[in-house]
Amino acid sequence: DADVTQTPRNRITKTGKRIMLECSQTKGHDRMYWYRQDPGLGLRLIYYSFDVKDINKGEISDGYSVSRQAQAKFSLSLESAIPNQTALYFCATSDPTSGGEQFFGPGTRLTVL
Amino acid sequence: KQEVTQIPAALSVPEGENLVLNCSFTDSAIYNLQWFRQDPGKGLTSLLLIQSSQREQTSGRLNASLDKSSGRSTLYIAASQPGDSATYLCAVRAAGNKLTFGGGTRVLVKP
């Protein structure tokens, strides 16, 4: 089945460390997104990309960077992790030619100590 | 700025009862609205997508309606089952291709 996968699924790190979250998809979609989910704040968009050469900031991009290595791969980096970046992170994809429905990966639970 | 609200935040019903989940949004200039299901600690599963030109979408026991002019969508789940227990999220896509999510309704279906 065409799918969206995320690695790692769980990560515990320390303040100041650099970490990378990876997303891969086999859906053949051009558009990819990174969200974070926090209790009481819902899901918020961090970055999105419409193709390999396109990167756009979302509503909460400070402290994050992304890389679109290929159509199927979109990575999120935290250059210097801080405790308030503890959250559940989701990658998503969509295809505008089929209505724009977004499909989400299983998530990465990140804890910054 | 688009705001999406889901009321109630939590709902508990006996098995077999129909579920009615509400979603309201402040800016009616949307491209589409999507309903998701999320199980605890898990990812989001897309349930239904309604384009702005549509009034409703159906999939099995699920039916979602959209009234753009009043900024409302309703998700109906017929004959609820314990396996329907989850959090249900709605999200609207407007200009800028950004999905704005509601806070979700946590549903418990009691056997």
Image (cartoon, rainbow, N blue to C red):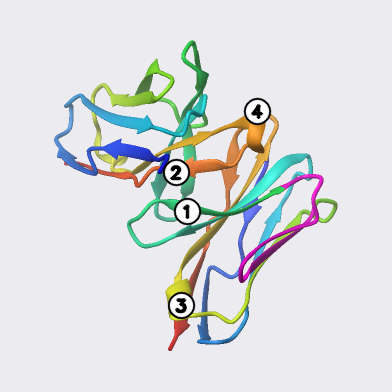
CB under 8 Å between discs 1 and 2: yes
- Whichever of labels 3 and 4 marks the residue nearer the N terminus, that label is 4
* Residue type highlighted by circle 1: Thr
- Which of the chains bears the disc numbered 3? B
- For disc 1, the marked residue is B45
- CA gap, disc 3 to disc 1? 17 Å
- For disc 4, the marked residue is B96
* Residue type highlighted by circle 3: Leu
Q: Mark 2 or mark 3, which is nearer to you?
A: 2
Up-down relation of residue A30 to residue A111 (above or below): above
User: Dot 4, how many residues are within 10 Å of its Cα: few (below 14), some (14-19), or many (20+)?
Assistant: few
Magenta part of the chain: B51-67
- CA gap, disc 1 to disc 2? 7 Å
- For disc 2, the marked residue is A104
- Which of the chains bears the disc numbered 4? B
Mark 1, secondary structure of its residue: strand
Q: Position of residue A40 (x, y in %)?
A: 45, 55
Residue A33 visible in the picture? yes
Q: Which residue is drawn at 67% across and 42% down?
A: B2
Mark 2, secondary structure of its residue: strand
Q: Residue at x 48, y 28 (%)?
A: A28
CB under 8 Å between discs 4 and 2: no
- CA gap, disc 2 to disc 3? 23 Å
Q: From the image, which quarter does the C terminus of chain A lie in?
A: top left
Q: Position of residue A111 (x, y in %)?
A: 22, 43
- For disc 3, the marked residue is B108
Up-down relation of residue B22 to residue A12 (above or below): below
- Whichever of labels 1 and 4 marks the residue nearer the N terminus, that label is 1
- Check if mark 2 and mark 3 are on a common chain: no
Q: Is residue A18 left or right of residue B26?
A: left
Q: Where is residue A94 in the image (x, y as percent from the top left)?
A: 54, 34
